[in-house]
Image (cartoon, grey):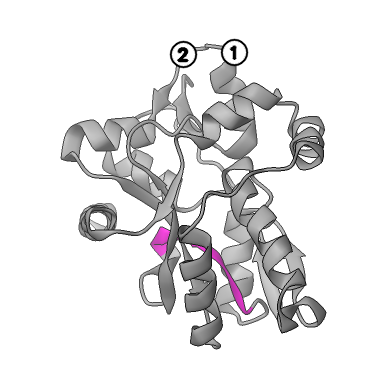
Amino acid sequence: MIFGKIEYLNLLPFHVFMKRFTKSSQQSMSMHYYRDVPAKTNKKFISKKVDAAFISSIRAKRQKHVNLGIIARGEVLSVLVIPSKEDVTDKESETSNVLAKILNVQGEVLIGDKALRYYLQEKPHTDLAKTWNQKHNLPFVFALLCYHKDKTLYKKIEKNFLKRRVKIPRYILNEASKRTDVAHDDILNYLKHISYNVDKKAKKGLDKFYKEAKKVSVNNKR
């Protein structure tokens, strides 16, 4: 089984959980990881070279998924548009590029840990999740945990991950800090802005995004 592992800080609690989960189950011998950025992971999943992964919402619409996602219920700190003379997309992203068009926010799209580092420098930016929430009063779902088969397994992962708060060991926090050049306290503060439960309100936000994305797509064809 190949799981698409996106090593952004927003999934750090999930990766800690999965490390424990696979050790305590028969999956420990069969789980292998494909590591890459969201846009490339999307392509690997759609071509069925990856069995499961957090797939960008714009690509997850017709895929099987559980109620686990990457969700912002206000500002997110790591999906930004920064000042630029021209509109520039982020090659690592798909959903965030579409979101910037929907919100008509002009500039350079920046996502992930590099965006968080930019945010921490207190430079000018627009937080896309915050802008979305202010406009629609809904959470924004950036990705969904999708799978091709083994629904029972992923429902079990959903249930176990959501029922308890994951504590990140100090050594993993140290590794993440060195890898991303983000301080421990900043990582922990950032994670307070990330939610994983695709509840009713998150589903409403996701439905709204799909409707708005369709409008953007139609307008671009004219």
Q: Which mark is residue 124?
A: 2
Say if the magenta span includes residue 33.
Answer: no
The answer to which of 203 and 129 lies nearer the viewer is: 203
How far is disc 1 from disc 2 in space, using C-alphas?
Answer: 9 Å
The answer to which of 144 and 110 lies nearer the viewer is: 144
**Horizontal side, residue 89 vs residue 106: left or right:** right
Q: Pointer 1: what residue?
A: 121
Residue type pointed to by label 1:
Gln
Query: Where does the C terminus fall, quadrant-wise?
Result: bottom left
The mark closer to the camera, 1 or 2, is: 1
- Inspect this view and state whether residue 214 appears: no
Where residue 201 sits in the image (x, y, percent)?
Answer: 22, 53
User: Where does the magenta region start and end?
Assistant: 51-58
**Horizontal side, residue 180 vs residue 207: left or right:** right
**Horizontal side, residue 108 vs residue 112: left or right:** left
Where residue 137 sits in the image (x, y, percent)?
Answer: 18, 39
- Inspect this view and state whether residue 140 appears: yes
Query: Is 121 above or below relative to 102?
Result: above
Q: Secondary structure at mark 1?
A: loop
Where residue 124 sits in the image (x, y, percent)?
Answer: 46, 13
User: Which quadrant of the view contains residue 20?
Assistant: bottom right
Most extreme residue toward the left is 136
Say if the magenta span includes residue 52.
Answer: yes
Residue type pointed to by label 2:
Pro
Query: Is 87 above or below relative to 159?
Result: above
Number of numbered discs overlaid on the protein picture:
2
